[in-house]
Image: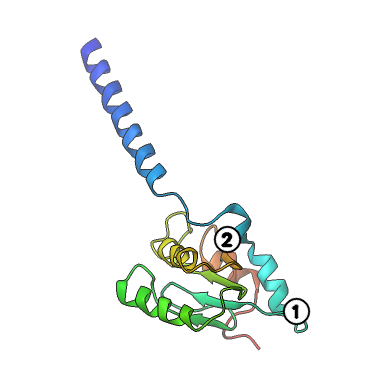
Amino acid sequence: MRKEIGVVGLLTLIILGMVTFKKMNQADPWRKDQLMEPSELAAILNNKSAHQPMIFSVGFAAGIKNSIVEGPARDSANLAKWKMQLQKIPKNTELVIYCGCCPFDHCPNVRPAFKVLNEMSFSNAKLLDLSHNIRVDWINKGYPTDNSQ
């Protein structure tokens, strides 16, 4: 019985170590100050006199008013399209990216897209902090959508 508990404990430690190591090697490419709350972007979009950032969906679809759909950034073809789009934009452009397929801590699209922004030295890039998904954190709150006036 003691030997079985020791083996289970050892296996648990190995698994926890692997998960921690994997998490450490997948550091987020954005800083905390580069996260934008949905309410902040909604307020900007609702204020016609406010400077409007460029908004890019790096996921499967749009949803946010005035956003440009680049397609899922986890796909190499879409990532190449994203890089081409960014080459046409000044490096100090205010821009916001989002996916919204799932919580961004699990999202396969926001990391590669934001990594490209860093590699290309964009200085005013933000990631929309969709802690659940686009429906819960944006649409259900009545924020401006691509279908709204």
- The residue identified by callout 1 is 50
View extreme (top): residue: 2
Q: Is residue 41 left or right of residue 113?
A: right
Q: Is residue 146 left or right of residue 47?
A: left
Expressed as whole percent of the image width and height from the top left, the position of residue 103 reads 48, 58
Q: Is residue 3 left or right of residue 35?
A: left
The disc placed on residue 133 is none
Q: Is residue 111 visible?
A: yes
Residue in the picture at 47% in, 54% down: 105
Residue in the picture at 62% in, 85% down: 148
- The residue identified by callout 2 is 129
Expressed as whole percent of the image width and height from the top left, the position of residue 32 reads 59, 53
Q: Is residue 24 left or right of residue 55?
A: left
Quadrant into which the N terminus falls: top left
For disc 1, the neighbor class at 10 Å (few under 14, some 14 to 19, many from 20) is few
Residue in the picture at 29% in, 29% down: 14
Q: CA distance from mark 2 to mark 1?
A: 20 Å
Expressed as whole percent of the image width and height from the top left, the position of residue 22 reads 35, 43
- Where disc 2 sits, the SS reads loop
- Where disc 1 sits, the SS reads loop
